[in-house]
Image (spheres, grey):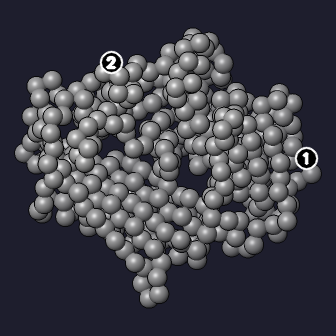
Amino acid sequence: MAETRVRASGILTPAHGAPRLTVSLDTLRFARDTAGRVTASRRLAGPLDQEAGKETGVLLTEAAGRAASAVAGLQSAVAQVHEWRDADGQPVSRRAELLARVETPGGPVLLGTSGPGDPAALVEALPWHELGAFADPLGSGAPPDDWRERPLVLRPSPAAVLVAGTAFSLTSRAGRATARRLAGRRVLPPLTLLDLPSAPSEWARDDRGDPARPTPLVDAGRICPPPPASPLGEGIPLGRAVWDHDTAAFGPPQLTRLRLTGPNAEVSADAMELVCCVEGLQRYHGDGTVRLQCLTRTADRPGSWFRVVLRGKPIHLLRQARGLAGPPTAVHSDSEVTTRSLVLASASDMEGAGHAVVTVITP
């Protein structure tokens, strides 16, 4: 059995006159044995990868144009287009990723998304309309006097940080012991967290030949037993092995793919909306906590922005979830997380339960 994988990677940075665009292409041919295990790979050259390269360039150019129409501070944009092809070279599946770093009056933010199929749709999937709200310097508004009593709504970008942190706390070496100890116990609201295969759905097995299936980490609020590990002792979860051509060995996927689902929750008219995270600050800390500094507004005063800092252990913060709101969104950064907006309790309630520290930064 044989298959071909194409990866087109591109980066765009602003420059005088016109943006500087660089695209690189990598095409690999894989051989599998009868059990579905990759046994070898070789690099190819030729016209097969040209379309993915062109699409990557167009994706970055259009992202730069949309950024210019919303804010003036695009720092860089990166994109990848992946194609999987069968033994005859016919396309079977494709996936694209887009990540833009944008300067706003409130600080630099990352906008990232990913998805299958046509890469062109990714540009419009980023929340450019939110950036248009930062036309005035941050700090022109102030939080309402009762902000501590208002529920918090984490839009998909900051919500994805909590989801990824929770997954890590249940799948790391220490986390697996925790998941084993808490397996079957309902410690969260009725949320379900799935770890997804890196292989496309058309591929039933990973590169080691093991079944590639979604693995529940949390099922309706109950902690699941830790995902099965490889019997070969490679430290790679079962069904997640990826062949590395340069080392001719299996390794874990570059990105963890996660999906959070759960019950609907209403967003009250006075909610505090944490829209996006300021970059350049350490998020994950050695004691297991996350610290998010988010550009925030209130639902009843959408033009008034300020910064909110939310600190706590991800799984403890999720214990304060009231449900999810809005459409599901794929957030691409250091992980790939599909989630809706996360509706949490108020700062007062979370701090009273000992699950968070919430502060407002004012000029």
Disc 2 element: loop
**Residue 206: % across, % down:** 27, 31
Q: Quadrant location of residue 231?
A: top left
Residue where numbered disc 1 is placed: 146
Residue where numbered disc 2 is placed: 231
As drawn, the residue found furthest toward the right would be 145
Q: Quadrant location of residue 1?
A: top left
Q: Residue at 21% of width from left, 48% of height from top? A: 5
In contact (CB < 8 Å): disc 1 and disc 2: no
Q: Is residue 222 visible?
A: no
In the rendered structure, which amino acid carries the disc numbered 1?
Asp
Disc 1 element: loop
User: In the picture shown, does residue 240 fall above or below 141?
Assistant: above
In the rendered structure, the answer to whether residue 17 lies left or right of residue 286 reads left
In the rendered structure, the answer to whether residue 343 lies left or right of residue 40 reads right
In the rendered structure, the answer to whether residue 314 lies left or right of residue 257 reads right
As drawn, the residue found furthest toward the left would be 88
**Residue 103: % across, % down:** 61, 69
Other residues around mark 2 within 10 Å, as few (<14) / some (14–19) / many (≥20): few
| The one of 329 and 238 positioned closer to us in this rendering | 238
Q: Residue at 16% of width from left, 44% of height from top? A: 41
Q: Decide which of tag 1 and tag 2 comes sooner along the chain.
A: 1
Q: Quadrant of the C terminus?
A: bottom right
Q: Is residue 251 visible?
A: yes
**Residue 264: % across, % down:** 62, 32
In the rendered structure, the answer to whether residue 146 lies left or right of residue 132 reads right
In the rendered structure, which amino acid carries the disc numbered 2?
Pro
